[in-house]
Amino acid sequence: MGRNQLVWGAALLLIGGLMLASEMGVRLPNGTSPTDLFWPIALLGAGVWVLVGVFFRGQVEMENISIDLQGASSANVKINHGAGELKIHSGANVNELAHGSFSGGLDHKANRDGDRLEVKMRPVNDFMKFPFFGANSQINWDLALNANIPIALDLNLGANKSVIDLTDMNITDLDLDTGASDTKIILPAGGRFRADLDLGAASLEVIVPEGLSARIRTSMGAADFKINESRFPRNGSVYQSPDFNSAENAVDMTIDAGAASIRVI
């Protein structure tokens, strides 16, 4: 039985016991109902649970998983990731779309649609889990993707730390949606592709490899934004390489951000 099941079982027994005592007319010495104790006890229990998670970390299950390419010639990969660390890079073999190690397990679906493989990846759900308590809430993934096929990559990230190294990959579209996170993206060195980066209170570093031209459009709130204007001169609200329109290798990038710290180098 998992720790989360034990916690929820104890909580349900506590609620039921307090409600039963109240229905039976039991009163505390000060005349209040036993149910008035629920929230103080619940908060004390939550504090104990957090301390247990910090000082008595259990062993987190690690799974090694491979996703077959199924003979597809392109792929659409959607990744949902929560609190923890995420690493994405190349390294899958020619018959795989991906392989990697996943703490806590991986829930994934892969369906062939013509020549395209549609893949969705997310952490395994633990029913009624406290997502922010204990060591087992940490989700650490190390994911290698196939660099030989065109991939549209859609990343929906929570409060995590991510290093997305796409240097030698064939990316056609990159979508990033992230909240309170620390993200480093190394863009592909070749091809013409689109990147749409949407972030809230986050830190983002985007590395544009030498030889990759860029057009960068921004929509900022209270953001700290730094960009290498020697490579990407500003023209109004757009930063653009002089040879963007004719370059063989180029990224058309949009950045929408709130209270964020952003560097494009």
Image: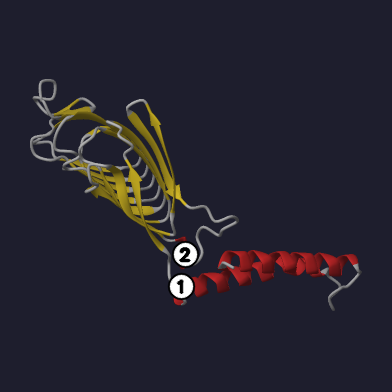
Q: CA distance from mark 2 to mark 1?
A: 7 Å
Left or right? Give the position of 96 relative to 40. left
Residue 217 visible? The answer is no
Q: Which residue is mark 2?
A: 136
Kind of residue sitting beneath label 1 = Gly
Q: Which residue shows up at 80% across the image and 70% down it?
A: 34
Q: Quadrant of residue 5?
A: bottom right
Give residue 129's position: percent from left, percent from top: 56, 58
Find residue 192 and report its horizontal and vertical position in percent.
18, 27
User: Split into 4 quadrants, where in the image is the N terminus?
Assistant: bottom right
Tell me residue 39's x, y (percent). Answer: 69, 65
Query: If the image is split into quadrants, where does the C terminus sit?
Result: top left
Q: Of callouts 2 and 1, which one flags the residue occurring earlier in the amino acid sequence?
A: 1
* Element on which disc 1 rests: loop
Q: Amino acid at mark 2?
A: Asn
Q: Which circle marks residue 58 in the picture?
A: 1
Residue 159, position as x, y percentages in the image: 41, 52
Q: Residue at the spot x=77%, y=66% of the render?
A: 36
